[in-house]
Amino acid sequence: MNPIIKQQIAKEARESIYAAHPSLIERFGENGIIQTEKDNVHHLDHLETAYSLKQPALFYDYSKWLQTVLESRNVGTHLIIDNFERLISILPGKIEPEEEDFMIDCLKEAIHLLDK
């Protein structure tokens, strides 16, 4: 994935999250806004690695680890799921079709695993 496109996707996800959940600004402040964009870059990095190795389980393992880390910081799983759903809606048309299909499938399965 082109690094510029990756950053644009991360920014779009962050903007969408904070537009939908303005209370997060009060809760996490400016640092939360910055961290949300960085987190989305990390999500995309892990999706990219899973794609390059053709190993979706790498992303699923990352998602479960992320859930543990964020829950320890009082960030609910529903926000991870919400974030992944936003990535599903943002990715189409921005990356190569095969990579897009793989990443969207990974995100959907991760949501299913987190929602159990």
Image (cartoon, rainbow, N blue to C red):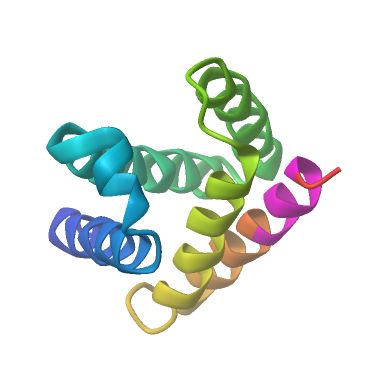
Of all residues, the one furthest to the bottom in this rendering is: 93
Residue shown at the point (18%, 55%) measured from the top left = 7
Position of residue 53 in the picture relative to residue 37 (left or right): right
Quadrant of the rendered image containing residue 38:
top left
- Residue 92 on image: x %, y %: 44, 80
- Residue 5 on image: x %, y %: 20, 64
Of all residues, the one furthest to the right in this rendering is: 116
Is 110 included in the stretch rendered in magenta? yes
- Residue 46 on image: x %, y %: 46, 38
Is 107 included in the stretch rendered in magenta? no
Q: Is residue 56 above or below residue 28?
A: below
Query: Magenta stretch: dominant SS?
Result: helix
Image: magenta residue range? 108-114
Which is more toward the observer, 48 or 52? 48
Identify the image quadrant of the C terminus: top right
- Residue 105 on image: x %, y %: 67, 63
Q: Is residue 89 above or below residue 21?
A: below
Which is more toward the observer, 103 or 107? 107
Quadrant of the rendered image containing residue 33:
top left
Residue shown at the point (17%, 32%) measured from the top left = 31
Identify the image quadrant of the N terminus: bottom left
Which is more toward the observer, 1 or 112? 112
Query: How many callouts does the rendering have?
Result: 0
Which is more toward the observer, 24 or 114? 24
Position of residue 78 in the picture relative to residue 79 (left or right): right
Q: Is residue 57 above or below residue 99?
A: above
Residue shown at the point (33%, 68%) measured from the top left = 16
